[in-house]
Amino acid sequence: MAKGPNAFRTISEAAEELGVPQHVLRFWETKFSFIRPMKRAGGRRFYRPQDIAVLSGVRALLHAEGYTIKGVQKLHREQGITHVIAAGLGDNGSASLDIPIDTPIDSAPHGELGEEARDRLVLALDDLEAVKARLDGLLKGL
């Protein structure tokens, strides 16, 4: 059963869709600060359509256009995330991804939380509340 174009992808689904191994996606997260999938409890990654578009652009720049990691970092710094995404959309392998890119990733004005930041904070709060509940349970047993 195929997911819709707006569905979140697990790391295995994202890796398969992009044609790269899962460990490559995890490595890219360490090298590119603009790759930030949502993480659920236990560290499970979920890639939004925007994340897939960014990853597709990184893949195109590194694999098809011959950029180095530092080259992609510099390109992102100088020309922004939309240029990275555009590189992926021009790549034949990602044309079939049908990725909506109408929602910018880093579009929140300074001082305001964007939807992505809010989602991350909600997830962090959920994790903290679960930890607190476990600690409270352990303390009651003492």
Image (cartoon, rainbow, N blue to C red):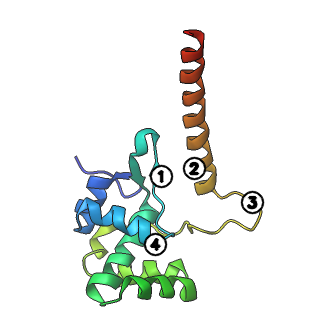
Q: Cα distance, mark 1 to mark 3?
A: 19 Å
Q: Which residue is mark 4?
A: 32
Of the numbered discs 2 and 1, the one sitting upstream in the chain is 1
Horizontally, is 25 left or right of 75 in the view?
Answer: left
Q: CA distance from mark 4 to mark 2?
A: 18 Å
Pointer 3: what residue? Answer: 112
Residue 7 seen from this side: no
Mark 2 and mark 1 residues within 8 Å of each other at the beta carbon? yes
Hey, what amino acid is under mark 4? Phe
Task: Check disc 1 and report the residue beneath it.
Answer: 38
Q: Which mark is residue 120?
A: 2
Mark 1, secondary structure of its residue? strand
Q: Please, is residue 9 above or below residue 141 in the view? A: below
Check the image and name the residue furthest to the right. Answer: 111
Dot 1 or dot 4: first in sequence order is: 4
Q: Secondary structure at mark 2?
A: helix
Crowding around mark 1 (Cα neighbors within 10 Å: few <14, some 14 to 19, many 20+) is some
Q: Position of residue 123 (x, y in %)?
A: 55, 42
Considering only order in the chain, which callout, 2 or 4, is on the residue closer to the N terminus?
Answer: 4
For the residues carrying marks 1 and 4, which lies nearer the camera in this image? 4
